[in-house]
Image (spheres, rainbow, N blue to C red):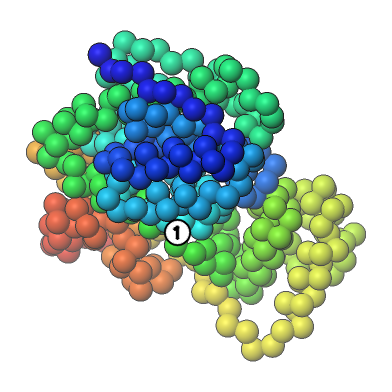
Amino acid sequence: MQATPKRIYVDTPALLQSVFQSFSQAKVLAIDTEFVRTRTFYPKLGLIQINDGKTLALIDPIAVPDLSLFWQLLANPNIEKVLHACSEDLEVFLCVGQCRPVNLIDSQIIMSFLGHGISMGYAAMIAHYSDIELDKSESRTDWMKRPLTEKQLSYAAGDVEHLFNIIPALKADITKAGWLAAAKEESALMIERKFTATDESQLYRNIKLAWRLNSAQLYRLQQLAIWRYQQAKQKDRPIGFIAKDHTLLGLAKVNPESVAIMAKIEGVEALDIRHKGNAMLSVLKRINAEKNVALPKAIVRLDEYPGYKQNFKKVKSYLNELSSETNLLAENLASKKQINQFLSWYYKLNGAEHHLHLVDIMRGWRKNLFGDKLLAFVENNYTAV
């Protein structure tokens, strides 16, 4: 039976120094964060939870804003950090501490390699390894409000108490399955993506129906998307609070000359025009005054490329066969997005041929396991229809 760690609420620099002296000697830590991000661009850190099996610290970043000891801990290569579904936690580490963690593994990724799907929840994972059913009623709490209630603190503590307790079983199972190195690599890949700077010039490609626009319209969409992103960062508001996708799309398509015309464009959000109409009009006027700009190339839709549907099915069939051979779920081998990423690169669509380093299937454990074989299969068996 697991011993219950001593729980400490850390709200002074002295307490922080004390608990981190202990944590710095640990071999493995269970870590989690609680944050709020409902009306802001950047996450607001409300609580940090750390458990080394002996001490479970609940660190109050509002009371103790100097978290340099925590960032040092995350960057310590001698300590393994285990987090669950930590994609958003990584954003906290990036935005709040500009800290890129080292020697981190995601327990959700481990569970995916053990056949539990790519997005197993924390409570389901704990239930799988124990008879504990967690109360998740505090998951939507306001972690910036003080004081935190005992129920909130107990909920937060549970996220690292139970996680630490199952780490030995997790490691034993993934080691026995033979996928520990791949799970570590997949965790590192997630960190790499989070800490890769956003290419603002490519944001427009993420806007639905952008493929319908010609090069001149795409340039307007590109510049509007850059403006929106910069406004969101500057004002610390979610991107959608600045302007909706369909508003930018409509303005890029029509190129209106006044706010009055903007309001009449189909699909444009009235609130966007009311609050940001003049600002967006200024962007369009600046674009119209530019000369000799390099326009984006028209977007080629992958799903309309000759033979795409047939070839996608062939790749899926190949991966399903490999799934049976490796005892990995097909979605672990490659998601639809990753298959499309591979096919876009193979077909040389929209500049993808210049970004081999971004093609997951052709790097790391996937490349070693099946990437080269899949490429040979593609080249030998594809027939454009």
**Residue at the limit of the structure toward the bottom, as seen here:** 292
- Quarter of the figure with residue 141: top right
Residue nearer the viewer, 136 or 384: 136
- Give the quarter of the figure containing the C terminus: bottom left
Find residue 224 and report its horizontal and vertical position in percent.
68, 65
* Left or right side of 239 for 112: left
Q: Is residue 16 left or right of residue 284?
A: left
Q: Residue at x 35, y 69 (%)?
A: 355
* Residue 248: image location, x then y, percent: 69, 58
Residue at 24% x, 60% y: name it: 363
Task: Examine the image and state in which quarter residue 258 appears.
Answer: bottom right
362 sits to left or right of 53 = left
Can residue 136 be seen?
Answer: yes
At mark 1, the secondary structure is loop
Indicate left or right for 93 with 368 as reference.
right
Look at the image and tell me in which quarter the N terminus lies. top left
Asked if residue 354 is positioned above or below residue 62 in the image, the reply reads: below
Residue 135's place in the image compared with 365, above or below, is above
Amino acid tagged 1? Phe
Residue named by callout 1: 195
Rendered residue at 43%/16% (across/down) = 134
Residue 294 in the image: x percent, y percent? 58, 83
Q: Would you place residue 137 above or below residue 28 in this image?
A: above
Q: Quadrant of residue 209?
A: bottom right
**Picture coordinates of residue 361, whole percent (x, y):** 25, 56
In the rendered picture of this protein, how many numbered marks are placed on residues? 1
Residue at (56, 70) in percent of width and height: 201
Residue 120 appears in the rendering: no
Please tell me how crowded label 1 is: few (under 14), some (14-19), or many (20+) other residues with Cα within 10 Å: some
